[in-house]
Image: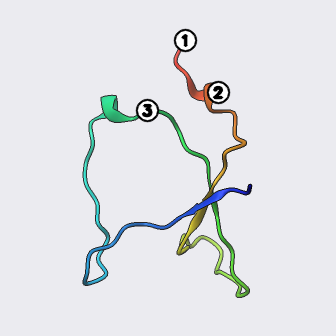
Amino acid sequence: MGMHIVTPATTDDGTPNISIIHIDCIFCAAHLIPVYGANFIAHGTNLHDSYYVNKYAYHHAFEIA
């Protein structure tokens, strides 16, 4: 079993489906790795269509003591 692939949510017209959530609603951090295609991406851009969710990341590293 590999890593899950996620994509950003969009509305019917293609605009990002975003919302603001309260900090208390965050359960844990997620380590996302971009899914790279066959083409080169210009340095400094952040244009990826999908991401791998790294289930092997150590999530306890971000816990508050």
Give above or below for 4 relative to 59. Answer: below
Coloration mode: rainbow
Amino acid type indicated by mark 1: Ala
Amino acid type indicated by mark 2: Ala
Q: Nearer the viewer, residue 5 or 49?
A: 5
Most distant residue in the front direction: 1
Q: CA distance from mark 2 to mark 1?
A: 10 Å
Judged from the image, the secondary structure of the residue bearing numbered disc 1 is loop
Judged from the image, the secondary structure of the residue bearing numbered disc 2 is helix
Q: Is the residue under label 1 in contact with that under label 3 (CB below 8 Å)?
A: no
Most distant residue in the bottom direction: 39
Disc 1: which residue: 65
Residue 58: x %, y % from top left? 69, 33
Disc 3: which residue: 27
Query: Which of labels 3 and 1 is toward the front?
Result: 3
Q: Nearer the viewer, residue 8 or 40?
A: 8
Residue at 65%, 74% (x, y): give it.
43
Residue 60: x %, y % from top left? 62, 25
Residue at 69%, 74% (x, y): give it.
36
Q: CA distance from mark 3 to mark 2?
A: 14 Å
Residue at 32%, 70% (x, y): give it.
16
Q: What label sits on residue 61 in the rendered view? A: 2
Q: CA distance from mark 3 to mark 1?
A: 15 Å
Give above or below for 36 relative to 8. Answer: below
- Circle nearer the N terminus (3, 1): 3
Judged from the image, the secondary structure of the residue bearing numbered disc 3 is loop
> Which quadrant would residue 39 be assigned to in this image?
bottom right
Residue at 73%, 86% (x, y): give it.
38
